[in-house]
Image: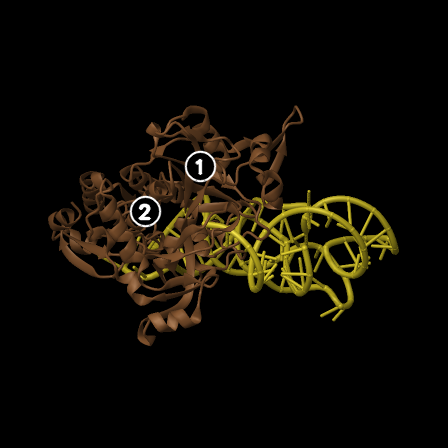
Amino acid sequence: MRRTHLFLPTLKDVPSEAQIISHRLMLRAGMVQQASAGIYSWLPLGLRVLKKIERIVREEQDRAGAQEVLMPTVQSADLWRRSGRYDDYGPEMLRIRDRHERDMLYGPTNEEQITEIFATHVRSYRDLPKMLYHIQWKFRDEVRPRFGVMRGREFLMKDNYSFDLDFESACLSYNRMFVSYLRTFARLGLKAVPMEAESGPIGGNLSHEFLILADTGESSVYCDRDCVEFDMLAREVNYENPKMVQAVVEDFTRPYARTDEKHDAAAFEAAVPPERRYVGRGIEVGHIFYFGAKYSEPLGARVTTAGGGEVAVHMGSYGVGISRLVGAIIEASHDEQGIVWPESVTPYGAGIINLRQGDSRCDGACEDIYAKLFHREPLYDDRPERAGVKFADMDLIGLPWQVVVGPRGIDRGRVELKCRATGAREEISLESALARLA
RNA sequence: CGGGGCGUAGCGCAGCCUGGCAGCGCGUCUGCUUUGGGAGCAGAAGGUCGCGAGUUCGAAUCUCGCCGCCCCGACCA
């Protein structure tokens, strides 16, 4: 993409409503624009990141054996009356009335919807287990939206739902998602720590939250520093092998890690030596639940068993806040200059800075590099701007690599390769720069 | 939902107390000079001062009402 074609409204000054760093950087980097409180438009740069996160989440869901569906944003109130949640959910649910005066709602979550789909089509234990997920916009009318996309009213969420014959089998599904989340967050460049959690209004009794440790987090966390040391991606996982999956879950749940709602000071001090105690803040980026027959019972999701009986299926739900992750990743990865994208979610794989636009040697070299870096989806800053503007902008939007082309080096066939994360700059030949980014 | 604050040019803000030509910086546009870390000079465009009433000869400014947005706390992916 050429910078002169890209709609990328970067800002020097930050709008005053933004307080936390990720929100400020997202506005400055032209990623989003606020439409109203807690509701955002996604501009090209922001949308590219959102899509990359979405893709990684999808790949890991599929890998764990889940199947993607897509349910509507607008749901019927009747469905929610059947589960009893239409009245329970309270003012956080956005209620809508259509032209025929039917009560509708903008879905804050989809347990009812998915359970109805499942109940319509599945009758036999032979069809179990199943995991169905979708990635869809939700709306929760938060009393106080804040922190930009980290706590919006409208947000993009991956929610998965598992259906099993009994508790033991449901635990296997739960474990699969547990491991899938560890892999997902690791691929996003995040150190996410699973913590025992309350299951909240969704109900049930087996639940973990996944938090990344960050000072700007909304949750208080207490954990063993060992939690963030695991290298999940180095670990071989075969989802077809329940024991192997179970072993991962056990390894990751062994160290003490709890949010304040489950925290037990005495247990913490007994389990964790002082030098390994982490007491700080965390951002919740995922939450998984087992809730048994809470929805399958009232909504009639029952299957016949091998013995000829009938049983309500055991369910679980598993959520990842995809739009929240955009902010969370920035919270975890930025510096004074701006965002520092992990390779896996960067909006463009490399930036090309032409320091002397209009100089035939520089222009020629940049065009050459631009074409040869095609596989990296490069962003070529071809604006007739001064060097300082281009450097500042490129640092702000945080692409992991910058190829700097200027008159000083180009006569000798040299360019500068800068690593955004470390700030390290090397003057090397054009060829070796291309080789490094191959 | 309790407490606090803010709405003035695309963005950041001053002006308001003490009513009297709507300003500054950044950005944008034009020209010249510059050109390796957010350039300099000269010129230009850009505003229902959130909305509605009221007071007044006169309201961005004072009064009342409404709307929007932000921050702190209690709740949530």
Residue A26 place in picture, x, y as percent:
43, 51
Residue A181 place in picture, x, y as percent:
33, 48
Residue A175: give its label.
2
- Judge from the rendering whether residue A151 lies leftward or rightward of residue A269; answer left or right: right
Q: Amino acid at mark 2?
A: Asn
Label 1: chain? A
The quadrant holding residue B56 is bottom right
Label 2: chain? A
Letter of the chain shown yellow in the rendering: B
**Lower sequence index among marks 2 and 1:** 1
Q: Residue at x 31, y 71 (%)?
A: A276
Q: Amino acid at mark 1?
A: Gln
Report the Cα–Cα distance between label 2 and label 1.
23 Å
**Between A41 and A246, the one nearer to me in the picture:** A246
Residue A357 place in picture, x, y as percent:
28, 46
Residue A272: give its label.
none
Residue A128 place in picture, x, y as percent:
34, 32
Residue A136: give its label.
1
Asked whether residue A14 appears in the rendered view, the answer is yes
